[in-house]
Amino acid sequence: MSGLDKMKNQILDEANHSAEAKIAEAKAKAEEIIQAAKAEAEEEAGKISQKSGEAVAIYGERVKSSCDMQRKKALLQAKQELIRGVLEKAQAQILSLETPAYFDMIREMLKKYAQPEAGTIRFSKKDLERMPEGFETEIQNIAGEKGGSLALEKDPADLDGGFILIYGGIEENCTIGAMFEAKRDELSDCVHKVMFA
């Protein structure tokens, strides 16, 4: 082999050696970039996973809170319906009292609501028909004790039970329905305490 060939071979060997070193260096750099990208991707995936976990937990809390609220709302509605039912039954029982007990109650109501002036009292057809003998006199006596007078209106009023007092053209609704309505909150509280305490 001539000196020229040796030189050529040496140059080629050095070039190959240099190329191999550059290729190895490029591969190492590429591997570094790949590893850095993998690490960054894993870190991002971790962050996304954590955020997703937090979002799922928050959503779960909201769902639980919403379910609790719906449950409480349904429970409250059921309680209100039970209380309303109890009050309706109580009102029906009062309206269906036996005549003596019913008119004992009417006497007490008259003592409370009669005014110290001249007026008129109206009853339902049912109450006019079952009114005890001498009750009209009792009405006048009770009104007299209050310093007033009450004339019994013979024309029946359209009401469930109880009576209507009329003084100077102004009606005072003393029906059983009106009494229950006026005391609804107070009665509801009492029933609630008895049933759910």
Image: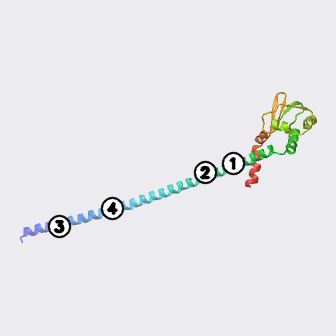
Q: Is residue 166 visible?
A: yes
- Determine the residue located farthest toward the top in the rendered image: 169
Task: Find out whether the residues at labels 3 and 4 contact each other: C-beta distance under 8 Å.
Answer: no
Q: Residue at x 50, y 55 (%)?
A: 55
Q: Which mark is residue 34?
A: 4
Label 3: element kind: helix
**Location of mark 3 (residue):** 14
Circle 2: residue type: Gln
Between residues 24 and 49, which one lies in front from this camera angle? 49
Q: Examine the rendered structure and indicate whether residue 75 appears above or below residue 128.
A: below
Label 1: element kind: helix
Separation of residues labelled 4 and 2 (CA atoms): 52 Å
Separation of residues labelled 4 and 1 (CA atoms): 69 Å
Q: Examine the rendered structure and indicate whether residue 32 appears above or below residue 168.
A: below
**Location of mark 2 (residue):** 70
Q: Nearer the viewer, mark 2 or mark 1?
A: 1
Separation of residues labelled 1 and 3 (CA atoms): 98 Å
Q: Examine the rendered structure and indicate whether residue 2 appears above or below residue 127.
A: below
The picture quadrant where one finds residue 24 is: bottom left
Categorize mark 3 by other alpha carbons within 10 Å: few (<14), some (14-19), many (20+). Answer: few
Position in image of residue 57 (x %, y %): 53, 57
Circle 4: residue type: Ile
Position in image of residue 171 (x %, y %): 81, 31
